[in-house]
Image (cartoon, rainbow, N blue to C red):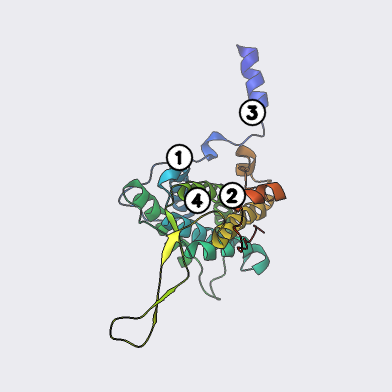
């Protein structure tokens, strides 16, 4: 037993310490306030773990809040460099064009966790005279290391929501003339989203791009060594063909970039 214990100790040298690994809690109601980076990481872990375990309950609100959160963290981590924030910015724009039924129950609590983290992140933006210090950069780096897993979780939940036909995109407006009026008015209509929709393809591509950018920058961090980067959507020709249905006659379908 002594020999086995010494061998285990030797094998453990250089590995991340167990006390440094976060254990995700469940989303809480009411949502605890976020005041520190530790609070933010705990809230992100709680929301992300619940969404990963319950992809069938993820809604458009989670996609919108999650992509906005990723963009906010990446803006702080990249100091606003447009070359570093393209993926998350595109994801946030695409998610904003989707609609869905509002979350209820634990799904609503999960959305509230993301909302609270997003509020705290936006308050950390500061002004020109409030430059982040070394400790701030360390805290931002911790949050930045969470983004690859968040992107994978959002992508999984988006796929499940598409299968349930619970995501909606704006359809072409229909002109109608009210009774007694000579003026036609455009009536806004929404329809269930499908994988071939441009906004859906943009969101899937942007989440994959966000995972790539962050995974490269965090590949040497302790959390990156403890938890390998999750699988991400492949962008090969054979894979992109899965995203778009066969075009009907006279219809042009935009392929995933």
Relative depth, front residue between 151 and 35: 151
| Tag nearer the camera, 1 or 2 | 1
Residue under numbered circle 1: 53
Q: Quadrant of residue 188?
A: bottom left
User: Which badge, 2 or 4, comes first in the chain's sequence?
Assistant: 2
Give SS at disc 4: helix
List x then y, in percent, for residue 74.
58, 61
Residue under numbered circle 4: 158
Circles 1 and 2: CB atoms closer than 8 Å:
no
Q: Locate residue 35 relative to residue 78 in the image: left or right.
A: left
Circles 4 and 1: CB atoms closer than 8 Å:
no
User: Which badge, 1 or 2, comes first in the chain's sequence?
Assistant: 1
- Label 1, label 2: how far apart the Cα atoms are: 17 Å
Q: Residue at x 43, y 42 (%)?
A: 54
Circles 2 and 4: CB atoms closer than 8 Å:
no
List x then y, in percent, for residue 202.
59, 60
Residue under numbered circle 2: 148
């Amino acid at each position: 037993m002594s020999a086995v214990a010494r061998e285990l100790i030797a094998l453990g040298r250089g590995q991340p310490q167990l006390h440094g690994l976060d254990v995700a809690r469940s989303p809480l109601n009411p949502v605890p306030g976020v005041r520190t980076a530790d609070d933010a990481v705990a809230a992100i872990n709680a929301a992300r773990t619940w969404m990963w375990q319950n992809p069938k309950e993820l809604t458009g609100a989670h996609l919108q809040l999650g992509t906005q959160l990723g963009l906010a963290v990446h803006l702080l981590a990249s100091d606003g460099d447009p070359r570093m924030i393209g993926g998350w910015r595109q994801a946030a724009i695409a998610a904003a064009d989707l609609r869905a039924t509002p979350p209820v129950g634990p799904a609503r609590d999960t959305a509230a966790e993301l909302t609270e983290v997003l509020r705290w992140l936006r308050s950390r933006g500061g002004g020109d005279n409030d430059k982040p210090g070394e400790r701030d950069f360390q805290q931002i780096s911790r949050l930045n290391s969470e983004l690859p897993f968040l992107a994978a979780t959002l992508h999984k939940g988006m796929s499940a929501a598409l299968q349930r036909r619970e995501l909606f995109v704006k359809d072409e407006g229909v002109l109608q003339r009210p009774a007694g009026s000579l003026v036609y008015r455009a009536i806004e209509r929404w329809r269930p989203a499908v994988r071939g929709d441009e906004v859906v393809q943009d969101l899937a591509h942007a989440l994959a791009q966000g995972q790539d950018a962050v995974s490269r920058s965090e590949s040497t961090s302790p959390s990156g060594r403890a938890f390998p980067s999750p699988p991400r959507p492949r962008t090969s020709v054979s894979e992109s063909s899965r995203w778009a249905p066969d075009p009907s006659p006279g219809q042009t379908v935009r392929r995933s970039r």
